[in-house]
Structures are given as C-alpha cells and as structure tokens.
Image (spheres, rainbow, N blue to C red):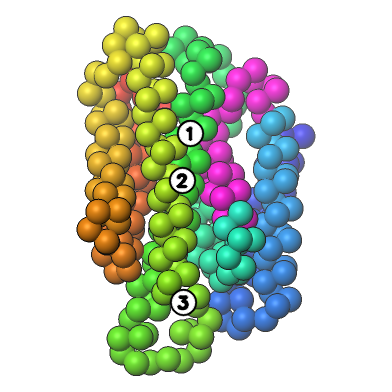
C-alpha cells in the first residue's frame, strides 16, 4: 500500500509539473486548474503515504534519505499550495513544483526499507526538530522560486523587452513580497530547528553543540538568512539584492541538507 501511494504521488507531481510548465508557455486557465488540482491530489496522497509509513515505522518517517527527500518534497508542496492560494499566482508552480518533483524522484533512488531506529534517534525531539527544519527549508524553496522569477522579470524591465514572458510573470512587488513572507516564516522555523536539535543532541550525546559538519553548515545557513532578514529590516534590502541572496541561501541550504550527508559524514549522516 505504501509503495502504491508513493508511486501515485510521484505521478501526480509529474503531471502537475507538466501542467504548470505548459502554463508558463501558454497561460490558459485550464492548465492552471489542472496543475492546481493535480498537485493538491498529489499532496493529499503524499500525506497519506507519510502517515502510513509513520504508522508502520512507529516514528516520524524522516530518518533516512528516502524518507527525508520525500518529506522535504511534501513540505514544499504544502507551502506552495498555501502561497498559490493567497497570491493567486499559478505561474509560481512553474518554478516550484519542478523542485518538489526532483526531490521526490530522487528519493526513489535510495533504499525505502524500514529498519530498526538508531538509538540516538529514539527521542521525543525527533519530530519537532525535523518538522521545523523541513518546513523552514520549504519556505526557503518557495522563496528561491519567487526570487528566480524576480530576476527574470527585472531583466525584461531593464532591457525594455515587455514581451509575453513579462506579461505572464507577477509584478516585482508581488514577487518581492512572496520572498519576504517566506523569509519571515522560514527563518523562525530554521531557528527553532537548530534550538530543538541542540536540545536533542544534549540528550543523545551529552553536548548541545559538537561542530559536527551538519551542525556547522546549519549554522552557516542560519547566518545567510539572518543576514538577509537583517538587511531587509534595517537597511531596506529589497528587490535584486534580496533575490540574489535568497537564491544563494537556497544553494547553501541544499548543501547543508544533501551535500553534507553525501560528502561530509558525521553524526547526522543519513543512510
């Protein structure tokens, strides 16, 4: 049953991505609706898959790369749906759903067997820490999509090429507002993830901070987004600067999540 839910979810995300990319090429309401309803169906099925796996495993299914990539994808889709409904910008899906699809498809390449839980992971802090982290990551992922769109739109304005692509994209103010809203939600979640992770580390290994590669890169990620938030609140960073730093932060985030696990093994490494 788990495998079936997983595969149908992957198909839904694939079809939603195709619909949103088609909408980017030819913006028709039927394509936007197809993308919206398909991604919502995929999200519902994805929630069912995650819940079913949690019941089978007896813990939150975020303890290996298969589960973590899947949950990351789930969080991105959930946050995207919320922003798409609030801003009525279906074209945002053209830049966000491909990210969720790639993550979900990547999880397919890692073992999905439910094995015994590492003793260090048997903690009540597991759910809080991981959920805070992945939903924080999800907000930053949507910010990445909005920032990428911002730079494209700004390029058209500077070159005074107000063609069909310019007309399809939201205004610069709307994209900048999405970027900022994602930051105001994502940064506190990332902060809570680091705090709960430190408490969890103390109960598991007897120290709040050990400069493990994952901890170090999580702190680097935190500083990148802290700098962006500080710049917005104190020096009025908006627009291009904020978009570029949001994109840079997303790549740092990806390395923190995947690169560290694959290339810098430590206490937090997934298998």
In terms of sequence position, does the residue under pointer 3 or pointer 2 come before the other?
Answer: 3
Residue under circle 2? 185
Q: Is mark 2 on a helix, strand or loop?
A: helix
Residue lying at 35% horizontally and 51% vertically, measured from the top left: 250
Q: Is residue 8 above or below residue 144?
A: above
Residue lying at 31% horizontally and 65% vertically, measured from the top left: 238
Q: Distance between the residues labelled 2 and 1?
A: 11 Å
Q: How far apart are marks 3 and 2 (CA)?
A: 22 Å
Density class for disc 1 (Cα within 10 Å; few <14, some 14-19, many ≥20) is many
Q: In this view, does 159 lie to the left or right of 46?
A: left
Residue lying at 27% horizontally and 34% vertically, measured from the top left: 219
Q: Is residue 236 left or right of residue 78?
A: left
- Give the magenta part as a residue range: 53-81
Residue under circle 1? 132
In terms of sequence position, does the residue under pointer 2 or pointer 1 come before the other?
Answer: 1
Density class for disc 2 (Cα within 10 Å; few <14, some 14-19, many ≥20) is some
Q: Which quadrant of the figure contains the C terminus?
A: top left
Q: Is residue 200 above or below residue 16?
A: above
**Residue closest to the eye, 2 or 81:** 81
In terms of sequence position, does the residue under pointer 3 or pointer 1 come before the other?
Answer: 1
Q: Is mark 1 on a helix, strand or loop?
A: helix
Camera-near label (2 vs 1) is 2
Q: What element carries label 3?
A: loop
**Residue closest to the eye, 212 or 200:** 200
Q: How far apart are marks 3 and 1 (CA)?
A: 30 Å
């Amino acid at each position: 049953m788990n495998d079936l839910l997983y595969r149908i979810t992957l198909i839904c995300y694939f079809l939603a991505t195709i619909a949103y990319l088609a909408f980017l090429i030819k913006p028709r309401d039927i394509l936007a609706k197809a993308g919206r309803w398909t991604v919502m169906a995929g999200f519902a099925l994805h929630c069912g898959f995650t819940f079913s796996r949690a019941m089978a495993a007896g813990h939150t299914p975020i303890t290996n790369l298969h589960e973590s990539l899947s949950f990351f994808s789930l969080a991105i889709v959930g946050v995207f749906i919320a922003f798409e409904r609030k801003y009525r910008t279906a074209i945002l899906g053209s830049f966000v759903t491909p990210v969720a699809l790639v993550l979900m498809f990547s999880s397919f390449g890692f073992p999905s067997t439910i094995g015994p839980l590492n003793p260090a992971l048997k903690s009540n802090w597991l759910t809080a820490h991981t959920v805070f982290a992945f939903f924080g990551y999800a907000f930053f992922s949507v910010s990445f999509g909005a920032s990428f769109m911002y730079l494209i739109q700004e390029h058209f304005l500077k070159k005074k090429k107000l063609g069909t692509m310019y007309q399809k994209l939201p205004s610069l103010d709307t994209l900048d507002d999405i970027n900022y809203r994602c930051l105001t939600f994502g940064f506190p979640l990332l902060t809570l993830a680091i705090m709960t992770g430190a408490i969890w580390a103390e109960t598991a290994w007897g120290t709040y901070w050990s400069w493990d590669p994952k901890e170090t890169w999580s702190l680097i990620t935190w500083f990148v987004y802290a700098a962006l938030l500080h710049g917005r609140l104190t020096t009025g960073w908006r627009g291009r600067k904020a978009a570029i730093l949001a994109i840079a932060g997303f790549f740092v985030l990806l390395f923190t999540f995947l690169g560290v696990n694959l290339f810098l093994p430590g206490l937090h490494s997934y298998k």
